[in-house]
Every structure is written in C-alpha cells, then in structure tokens.
Amino acid sequence: MIELYAITDHPTPPLPQVAPLRLVATGDLAAICAPAGDDGVSADALWRHEAVVEALMEQRDLLPVRYGTRFDDEDAAARAVEARRDDLAMALDRVRGAVELSLRVIEPGAPQAGDGASYLRDRRRQEDARRALHEPLAAVARAAMTRPSPDRSELLRAAYLVDRDAVEQVTGLIAQLQAANPTLRLLCTGPWPAYSFAEA
C-alpha cells in the first residue's frame, strides 16, 4: 500500500529526503508517493503528510493531494493518474508558479442578532466590510475563493492563489488593510501548497 502526496511534472527536480519518496511517472506527469504507514489517522500523521508536501513545494510546481489518498501499488497509482491525465495537467497549469495564502478576518465582539431591522443593518455592514477587504486582495491574486463560516465573529474566510514572487506584495496589502481596520483581526497564513485551487 502506498500513499500519494502530490502530482507534479515529469521530469522533476530530485526529491527531498523528508520521507522514502518515490516518483511514479506516466508521460509528462508523475505521482509522488511513499509506503503508507499503518498508524491510522492522527494529528501527527496529518502534520507529517503536510510537512512532506511543503518540502516538495519548495522546488517544484505541484498539485497537493490530501492526506489519506492511497493505492495498492505504484501501478494502480500510475493508472489513476493516466485516467485523469488531462484534468490533472490543466489543474497543474492553473497553479503553476503560484502558492496559496489563507486569510481569516475576525470581528471581536461582533454584535449578536437583535430585532429584524438591526439584524439587517448589521448584515449589510458586515457584507460591506467583507467586500472592502476581499476585493483588493482578489484583484492582485491570480484566483480567489471564499468559504462560509459558522462563526458570526468570523467576517471573512478566504484563500488566494498568488504568484510566488507576489507573496510580499499581497502580505503587505493585508498589513495595510489591518492598519485601516483596527477593530478587526486579519490572520494571514502561508504560503501553502495550493490545496484550495488544485481541486477546482
């Protein structure tokens, strides 16, 4: 049993020595995999997987694969890649040269729902604030997406696909937005492998 970490171009730079990684090539694509552990799902296993994908990201463009994607053997992995070759190649082209930045915007002490009129006013104010934060970032990113949040105090949860050489520009813009909105907390993380955009 093998575990899949990423899909990348073939040929590719030498693999990092962070795990017993193997390259399973099929045409101009390759699956990067390693023997699957038998320790089950755990926080440590998830972090190990993420550390491998981040090490791979340092030297190559890749489609990161979520933890737990396994195949019986390398032949099965090669067949799976070949079956989706066109989709995988397009997705790899979409994220080529880019990384993901994640942003959460928290409004500490966000007002709780009141009567109908105040609720609607508050929703409108939050929507205006969300748009004022998201739109300038989306304009400098290659792609952007937002996700709903169950927490009313979380004003925005978003991911941005950013060219590698534009990361400082985007994080600088986030710092400016934070300075202009001192009552909010803008929490930016990354750069990460482009999980949110590899699956599109």
Image (cartoon, rainbow, N blue to C red):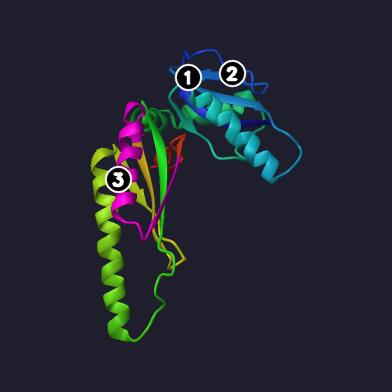
Q: Residues in magenta?
A: 162-189
Q: CA distance from mark 2 to mark 1?
A: 9 Å
Q: CA distance from mark 2 to mark 3?
A: 36 Å
CB-based contact (under 8 Å), mark 2 and mark 3: no
With 39 as the anchor, is 79 left or right in this view? left
CB-based contact (under 8 Å), mark 2 and mark 1: yes
- Residue carrying label 3: 176
Of label 3 and label 1, which has the lower sequence position? Answer: 1
- Identify the residue shown where x is 64% and y is 18%: 17
Check residue 103 in the rendering and tell me which mark sits there, or answer none.
none
Q: Is 19 or 85 nearer to us in this picture?
A: 19
- Identify the residue shown where x is 34% and y is 35%: 162
Q: Is 147 or 24 nearer to us in this picture?
A: 147
Instruction: Tell me the chief SS of the magenta region.
Output: helix
- Residue carrying label 2: 16
Of label 2 and label 1, which has the lower sequence position? Answer: 2
Q: Is residue 74 magenta?
A: no
Q: Position of residue 146 (x, y in %)?
A: 36, 53
Q: Name the residue type under label 1.
A: Gln
Q: Name the residue type under label 2.
A: Pro
